[in-house]
Amino acid sequence: MPSLHPDPGFDYYYKACKKGDSEAKAVTVDQSPVTALANANAITGLPRDNFEIREISKEEFEGAATLSEPLMKSSALEESSRLTKLCFL
């Protein structure tokens, strides 16, 4: 039976940047614009409306993804540590 949602054969890549940033530096990158926005919010603590989403090339995505992995991991560890501390207050 054929799929109702076949793979279109191409991928989209997105970056979340702070609004008004003339250099458009990526805060996070992802294949989902919603996830990129949520991760930017989680990393910086700024409201989601402080970011804009831009579509990027696969090469830009792969380059930025390798740079942001340590940031994402450290952010997740900090969040986990913060939640653990709240549990013991």
Image (cartoon, rainbow, N blue to C red):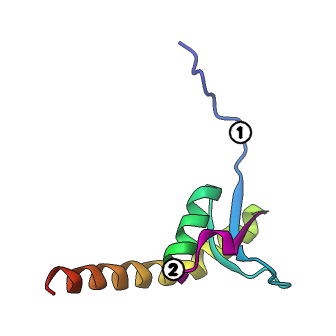
Q: Is residue 39 above or below residue 70?
A: above
User: Is the residue under label 1 in contact with that under label 2 (CB below 8 Å)?
Assistant: no
Residue under circle 2? 43
Of label 2 and label 1, which has the lower sequence position? 1
- x, y percentage for residue 4? 59, 21
Q: Secondary structure at mark 2?
A: helix
In the image, which is nearer the foreground, mark 2 or mark 1? 2
Q: Position of residue 65 (x, y in %)?
A: 60, 73
Instruction: Give the residue at x 53% y 70%.
Output: 39
Q: What are the residue bounds of the magenta stretch?
A: 43-54
Residue indicated by mark 1: 9
- Quarter of the picture containing the C terminus is bottom left
What is the x, y in percent for residue 50?
68, 75
Secondary structure at badge 1 equals loop
User: Where residue 26 sits: x, y (%)?
Assistant: 69, 78
Q: Residue furthest right?
A: 22
- Foreground pick, 13 / 1: 13
Q: Closer to the camera, 2 or 42?
A: 42
Amino acid type at image mark 1: Gly
Q: Quadrant of residue 21?
A: bottom right
- Amino acid type at image mark 2: Ile
